[in-house]
């Protein structure tokens, strides 16, 4: 599981453009926040007990370790660090099959996001169906590094 999490955070694979976004691409990406998360993840000491590694991953993503982030990096699915420009408030216009339309994440994202990672907010999202997952499709965020002038998901 640790390998899967690290690959998700540190990978440099190129994903297709965020679905259904046309020429705007991944316009929900908080680039500075995303880069801060990657830099913090690279500096983690992985030779520690899992609970300490997991807490480090949550903080590297730009999140507080608290009840609302207890799902982050704690199962096979919630391993995508999603750094967004603005708070994702609701899933009423769900673009991902299986996501609940009444899941109001906005207040949790605001409360859990660490300000030191840059503007915007962070959340741990589901990686299932990548690259057409929650971070890319629902929030329109680039999770992999790409050209600064023309982000590619």
Image (cartoon, rainbow, N blue to C red):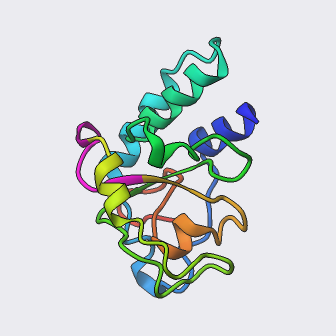
* Viewer-proximal residue among 117 and 89: 89
Q: Residue 19, relative to residue 65: is it above or below?
A: below
Q: Which quadrant would residue 54 be assigned to in this image?
A: top right
Residue at x-position 44% and y-position 64%: 151
Residue farthest to the front, as pictured: 67
Where is residue 45 drawn, in percent x and y? Answer: 55, 15
Relative placement, left or right, of 80 versus 29 is right
* Viewer-proximal residue among 27 and 147: 27
Q: Which quadrant would residue 125 be assigned to in this image?
A: bottom right
Q: Give the magenta range.
A: 115-122
Q: Residue 148, relative to residue 16: is it above or below?
A: above
Q: Which quadrant would residue 121 be assigned to in this image?
A: bottom left
Residue at x-position 51% and y-position 28%: 55
Q: Residue 129, relative to residue 117: is it above or below?
A: below
Where is residue 9 drawn, in percent x and y? Answer: 57, 42
Quarter holding the C terminus is bottom right
Count of numbered badges drawn on the protein: 0
Residue at x-position 62% and y-position 12%: 48
* Viewer-proximal residue among 45 and 90: 90
Where is residue 46 drawn, in percent x and y? Answer: 62, 18
Quarter holding the N terminus is top right
């Amino acid at each position: 599981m640790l390998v899967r999490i690290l690959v998700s955070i540190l990978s440099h694979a190129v994903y297709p453009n965020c679905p259904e976004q046309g020429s705007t691409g991944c316009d929900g990406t908080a680039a500075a926040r995303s880069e801060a998360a990657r830099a913090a993840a690279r500096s983690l000491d992985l030779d520690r007990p899992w609970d300490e590694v997991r807490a480090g991953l949550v903080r590297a993503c730009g999140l507080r370790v608290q009840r609302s982030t207890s799902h982050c990096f704690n199962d096979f699915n919630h391993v995508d660090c999603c750094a967004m420009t603005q708070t994702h408030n609701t899933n009423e216009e769900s673009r991902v099959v299986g996501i609940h339309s009444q899941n109001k994440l906005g207040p949790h994202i605001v409360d859990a996001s660490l300000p030191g990672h840059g503007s915007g907010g962070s959340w741990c999202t589901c990686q299932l169906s990548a690259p057409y997952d929650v971070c890319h499709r629902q929030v329109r965020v680039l999770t992999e590094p790409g050209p600064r002038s023309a982000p590619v998901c």
